[in-house]
Amino acid sequence: MSKGKLYGIGVGPGDPELLTLKAKRVIESSPILAKPVKKSGEESVAFTIIRPVVDLSKVEVVDLLFGMTGDDADYWEFGRKAGEQVIGYLSRGMDVALITLGDVSIYSTFMYMEQYVRSQGYDTEIIPGIPAFCGGAAKARVPLTLGDQCLAVVPSAKDNPMLEEALEKFDNVVVMKAGKSVGKVLDMLKEKGYGPECVTAVSNVGMPDEYVGMADPDRPYGYFTTLIVKKSFKKVCRWRRCRPSTSPPGDVW
């Protein structure tokens, strides 16, 4: 019996219409659709995104447990256990499509599992999706980089010394999972002479409660919040100000 193939599929930031044609085709043609969850029966945001635009009538949906401990060693173990579960299908010749938010190559639980599955002699393929910070930058009409500028992507602001270094050395910084750290990032920038006009907050991009606007430390933000820091917004653009210094919450520039 031939072995099945494992697909890692990025479903984009939240708008179902941003799902790629290839992602849709592979999901619909795979007998098994796997969705990572923290506990069995939990709702999957990635699954919620694809459900309106994908025909799942011939697909079995299964949960893969991935705890969110923040410990890299734990993630490798979660990946091994999930990999064993997936191999149970692959060994019977069934393809498995695993869905994940944004792009598979950016802070995705899939990559912990993919290496284990491949080490056991099974074929894998990654289908890219639009990363959340790219979707947010597009919504805000903010260039992530221009000319010879550099870009740093930091996984979170919580107890992260890399953030201080990135804000010091890079022209543009993307801070992911920043919902509880907006004030901290603004304070760090203020110490370096940069105001809030340099920071765009994008939260739940493509979802019903989407927010795109200037970062406000007094506003509540959810888990899927990304900050886009552009030092150049302190300066005047060639034809006009890059963005206003003040604007009502929720405006998209």
Image: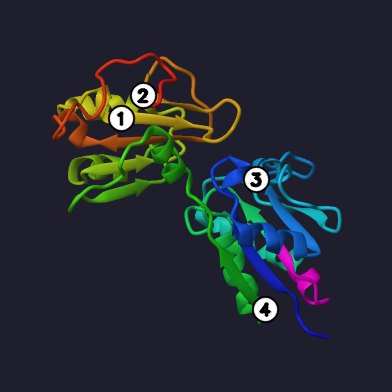
Q: Would residue 118 be counted in the magenta stretch?
A: no
Residue designated by label 2: 215
Where's residue 187, x and y in %? 27, 24
Q: Earlier in the sequence, mark 4 or mark 3?
A: 3
Residue designated by label 1: 199
Give the Cα separation between the discs numbered 2 and 3: 26 Å
Secondary structure, mark 1, is: strand
- Amino acid at the residue labelled 4: Tyr
Where's residue 131, x and y in %? 47, 49
Give the Cα separation between the discs numbered 1 and 3: 27 Å
| 202 up-or-down from 70: above or below | above
Q: Earlier in the sequence, mark 4 or mark 2?
A: 4
Q: Earlier in the sequence, mark 4 or mark 1?
A: 4
Q: Earlier in the sequence, mark 2 or mark 3?
A: 3
Secondary structure, mark 2, is: loop
Label 2 close to label 1 by CB (< 8 Å): yes
Residue designated by label 3: 46
| Residue found 30% across the figure and 49% down from its top | 152
Where's residue 125, x and y in %? 60, 70
Secondary structure, mark 3, is: helix
Label 4 close to label 2 by CB (< 8 Å): no
Q: Nearer the viewer, residue 181 or 72?
A: 181
Q: Which residues are magenta?
A: 87-97
| Residue found 70% across the figure and 40% down from its top | 48
Q: Nearer the viewer, mark 4 or mark 3?
A: 3
Q: Earlier in the sequence, mark 1 or mark 3?
A: 3
